[in-house]
């Protein structure tokens, strides 16, 4: 079973709401810190280099997400499988999943690092980045992709920690590496007069630090998550289980990224000021997404452990508790960000027009995030049972389909920034309704209980 300790959380017994909060809040803080440190890249180049450099860094966001989301989705597979093994007390399965996940992250990162050196320039061309930002955008993307081995390693190891309910350790390690990132940003850009290459190098170095520290902790661990060099191999059966959950989850993330790339291209067709406002707003609105996505991941781990232990009634109850707690924290976060939206945007760029466009995006996106919370929680609930394909298919059909239709049919008829941003609440509300219906119809907890009874018979 799960070894009790200061960093491990028993999700199998007792009240649920407090455990969900204690799991989700450090995870949300981790995601927010990531966004703060990523925002430091944009803020530093915006202040010390200029708007074109700011647009160059920001325009790479959807592309970077598209390339890594498949592997981040696979890390969700790691989270689910290890959670289920821990709940079932299968420590040998935990050991195999840990070592398999680490090797897959490193090998996958190496593939992306090599591939990135050949595809960076064509990607920037396809994205229709303005000429004054094109060269810097390609440079930033090329350096960033060189760091994919350590970036993916951090994500996979964080998933390993989350599987046992520990979200505090990745948070503390990220804070350390983030401080290093900010310091290096200032040194490289303000001190050495580098441009986007400075912030890209700082990002890679900080991820190297965070992944190395987390890996070192696992090497010294005394429980089933302990990493040993002699056990470092890929177990094909375990890999198959991870991929069964992880690939659909990754595809779902890629679908969102692909749809957002299409929207980003439409934003790029307006002008650089709109791009800069959208980039700044993206970092502000990401705070709310960090909160809502943390509850989606919390319910995944919660359901995964209880599914492994056969506690299917507790799995079902966790869905309602997660919605109640998640929307409470989401509402507080939105209220605070709306109150301080203008000062936050001014940090990235003080130009009035940039701030005006940033506020337009923030208002539309906050409305969309109301439905995005439902999408994340329902998807996470189903993934906890190992059912990752259904939410992925729903996202593919409805998120991607609606956003493509909007960009190529609705937006050209009235090509304004507000019309373009309206696609977020429209697509997310429909997707949330469809995934909710799918969760009711498939009844994953009932199917899990039936499998348990068949095994007992």
Image (tube, rainbow, N blue to C red):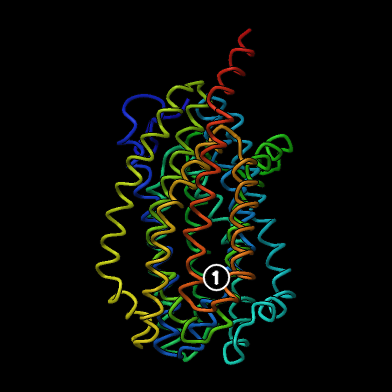
Relative to 415, residue 153 above or below: above
Pinpoint residue 203: horizontal percent, then vertical percent.
Answer: 50, 71
The picture quadrant where one finds residue 339 is bottom left
In this view, the residue in front, 38 or 369, is 369
The single residue placed furthest to the top in the displayed view is: 457
Image quadrant containing the C terminus: top right
* Residue indicated by mark 1: 61
In this view, the residue in front, 84 or 336, is 336
The picture quadrant where one finds residue 18 is top left
Q: Residue at x 34, y 36 (%)?
A: 19
Pinpoint residue 185: horizontal percent, then vertical percent.
Answer: 44, 79
Instruction: Tell me how many marks there are.
Output: 1
* Helix, strand or loop at mark 1: helix
The picture quadrant where one finds residue 414 is bottom right
Disc 1: CA contacts within 10 A as few (<14), some (14-19) or many (>=20): some
Answer left or right for 301 relative to 4: right
Q: Residue at x 55, y 22 (%)?
A: 446
Answer left or right for 13 relative to 106: left
Answer left or right for 90 relative to 15: right
Relative to 396, residue 209 above or below: below
């Amino acid at each position: 079973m799960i070894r009790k300790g200061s960093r491990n959380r028993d999700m199998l017994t007792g009240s649920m709401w407090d455990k969900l909060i204690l799991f989700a809040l450090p995870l949300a803080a981790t995601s927010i810190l990531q966004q703060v440190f990523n925002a430091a890249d944009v803020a530093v180049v915006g202040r010390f280099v200029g708007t074109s450099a700011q647009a160059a860094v920001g325009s790479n966001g959807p592309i970077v997400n598209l390339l890594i989301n498949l592997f981040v989705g696979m890390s969700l597979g790691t989270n689910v499988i290890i959670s289920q093994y821990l709940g079932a007390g299968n420590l040998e399965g935990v050991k195999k999943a840990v070592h398999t996940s680490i090797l897959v992250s490193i090998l996958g990162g190496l593939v992306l690092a090599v591939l990135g050196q050949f595809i960076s320039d064509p990607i920037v061309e396809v994205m229709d980045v303005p000429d004054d930002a094109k060269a810097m955008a390609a440079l930033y993307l090329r350096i960033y992709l060189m760091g994919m081995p350590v970036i993916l390693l951090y994500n996979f190891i964080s998933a390993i920690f989350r599987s046992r309910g520990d979200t505090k350790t990745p948070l503390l390690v990220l804070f350390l590496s983030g401080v290093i990132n900010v310091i290096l940003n200032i040194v490289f850009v303000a001190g050495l007069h580098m441009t986007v290459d400075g912030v890209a190098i700082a990002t890679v170095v900080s991820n190297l630090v965070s992944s190395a520290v987390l890996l070192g902790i696992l090497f010294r661990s005394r429980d089933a998550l302990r990493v040993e060099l002699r056990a470092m191999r890929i177990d094909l059966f375990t890999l198959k289980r991870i991929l069964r959950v992880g690939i659909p989850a990754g595809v779902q993330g890629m679908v969102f990224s692909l749809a957002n790339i299409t929207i980003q291209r439409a934003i790029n067709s307006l002008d650089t000021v709109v791009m800069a406002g959208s980039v700044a707003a993206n970092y502000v609105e990401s705070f709310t997404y960090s909160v809502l996505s943390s509850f989606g991941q919390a319910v995944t781990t919660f359901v995964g452990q209880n599914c492994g232990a056969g506690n299917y009634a507790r799995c079902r109850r966790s869905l309602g508790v997660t919605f109640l707690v998640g929307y409470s924290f989401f509402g507080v976060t939105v209220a605070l960000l709306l109150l301080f939206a203008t000062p936050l945007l001014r940090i990235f760029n003080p130009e009035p027009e940039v701030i005006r466009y940033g506020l337009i995006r923030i208002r539309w996106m906050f409305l969309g995030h109301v439905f995005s919370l439902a999408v994340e929680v329902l998807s996470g609930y189903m993934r906890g049972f190992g059912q990752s394909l259904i939410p992925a298919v729903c996202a593919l059909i409805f998120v991607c389909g609606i956003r493509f239709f909007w960009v190529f049919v609705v937006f050209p008829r009235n090509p304004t920034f507000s019309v373009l941003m309206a696609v977020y609440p429209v697509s997310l509300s429909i997707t949330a309704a469809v995934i909710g219906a799918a969760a009711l119809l498939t009844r994953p907890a009932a199917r899990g209980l039936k499998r348990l009874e068949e095994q007992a018979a």
